[in-house]
Amino acid sequence: MIDETVYLGILYDYYGELLTAKQKEVFEAYYFENLTLQEIADEHNISKNAVHKTLMSMEEKLKYYEEKLGFYQKAEKIKECIKDEKLLKQVLDIL
């Protein structure tokens, strides 16, 4: 089973553009820059609790998008079916 943090990063790659600019900033600060909730709160002049709620909301949204659209699961199935690396890359680039 894939690590939750890695999974959320993958979902962000697929669905991040569906989030607001502020949500993306908070997500990237926490998951990609490894900032603490307090550091993000200070940077954005919001409470630590607001950062936490924002992250929880985004995680739910990303999982909801995947549940409804299934891009990650479809890409994984394609990877299982296509063994030719060059062809696989071409197909995944299309997605």
Image: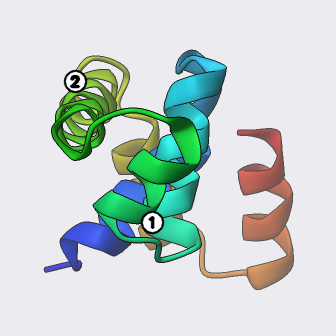
- Picture residue at 82% right of the left edge, 51% below the top: 93
Q: Give the mark toward the camera: 2 or 1.
A: 1
Are there few (<14), some (14-19), or many (20+) residues within 10 Å of tag 1? Answer: some
Whether residue 64 is visible to the viewer of this picture, yes or no, is yes
Which label was assigned to residue 31?
1
Image quarter of the C terminus: top right
Left or right position of 56 against 82: left
**Quadrant in the rendering for residue 7:** bottom left
- Picture residue at 61% right of the left edge, 41% below the top: 25
Left or right position of 69 against 52: right
Q: Which residue is mark 2?
A: 64
Q: Observer-nearest residue: 79 or 58?
A: 58
Q: Observer-nearest residue: 1 or 37?
A: 37
Residue type indicated by callout 1: Tyr
Q: CA distance from mark 2 to mark 1?
A: 19 Å
Q: Secondary structure at mark 2?
A: helix
- Picture residue at 57% right of the left edge, 55% below the top: 28
Q: Position of residue 81 (x, y in %)?
A: 48, 65
Whether residue 81 is visible to the viewer of this picture, yes or no, is no
